[in-house]
DNA sequence: TGCCTGATGTTCT
DNA sequence: GAACATCAGGCAC
């Protein structure tokens, strides 16, 4: 569960879809070595990696590897648990339909109020974005594994994971 | 319901 | 100067 504390209240989102990226992976930002932008991905796990893409969208990742290894998990979609009004307000346009609030990486970042890369490289925590265990355990058998979405390289690597039957998953 | 396309700017070659 | 871990709106069916 992702948690964001704001002065207007708490947002809690249950993660329902992720993708893995690694430095040996041609589709990863870290494939061609470390740059200023991707430096956080080479830190030890437990930090945030936020990047800006397509001229208008931010995407949120959780850095996962050992220090020196460029590795992270992209959070692609989530289910709102708390702070729905805040989420709608952050999303603005196109926020009428519940399932379209957070069913994609750009939408998810917008729902959390991420509108810069300021958080990139920061540690996970209550003053940034926090990560907590799910309220109830997830049955591993309900996690579907497929190839990733929206990439043009290494399309066959089955590194996308989502919760079977969840309405907030970005794409079947 | 599903394809097609424009918006928009950072990053790296 | 091209590519890009995307989204929403428009149009055809």
Image (tube, coloured by chain):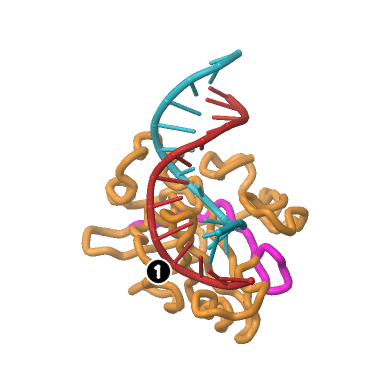
Chain colours: A orange, B red, C cyan
Q: Position of residue A11 (x, y in %)?
A: 35, 57
Q: Position of residue A104 (x, y in %)?
A: 50, 48
Q: Is residue A127 visible?
A: yes
Q: Magenta span has A86?
A: no
Residue at the bottom extreme?
Answer: A67
Q: Is residue B13 left or right of residue A167?
A: right
Residue at the left extreme?
Answer: A7
Q: Position of residue A10 (x, y in %)?
A: 31, 59
Q: Which residues are magenta?
A: A11-27
A165 or A107: nearer the viewer: A107
The image quadrant that residue A101 belongs to is top left
Please, what is the dominant secondary structure of the magenta stretch? strand
Residue A52 lies, with reference to residue A76, above or below; the image says below
x 64%, y 79%: residue: A33
A24 or B5: nearer the viewer: B5
Q: Is residue A44 left or right of residue A122?
A: right
Asked which secondary structure carries label 1, the reply is: loop
Q: Residue beneath label 1, please?
A: A117
x 60%, y 55%: residue: A138
The image quadrant that residue A69 belongs to is bottom right
Assign the C terminus of chain A to one quadrant of the image: top right
Q: Is residue A139 visible?
A: no
């Amino acid at each position: 569960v992702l948690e964001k504390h704001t002065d207007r209240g708490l947002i809690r989102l249950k993660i329902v879809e992720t993708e893995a990226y690694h430095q040996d992976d041609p589709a990863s930002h870290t494939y061609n070595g470390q740059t200023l932008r991707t430096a956080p991905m080479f830190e030890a796990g437990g930090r945030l990696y936020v990047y800006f893409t397509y001229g208008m969208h931010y995407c949120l990742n959780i850095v996962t590897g050992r220090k020196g290894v460029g590795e992270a998990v992209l959070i692609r979609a989530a289910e709102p648990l708390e702070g729905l009004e805040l989420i709608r307000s952050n999303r603005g346009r196109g926020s009428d339909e519940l399932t379209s609030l957070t069913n994609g990486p750009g939408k998810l970042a917008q729902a959390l109020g991420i509108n810069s890369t300021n958080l990139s490289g920061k540690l996970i925590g209550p003053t940034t974005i926090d990560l907590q265990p799910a309220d109830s355990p997830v049955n591993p058998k309900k996690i579907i594994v497929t190839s990733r979405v929206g990439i043009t390289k290494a399309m066959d690597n089955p590194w996308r994971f989502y919760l079977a039957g969840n309405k907030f998953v970005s794409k079947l």
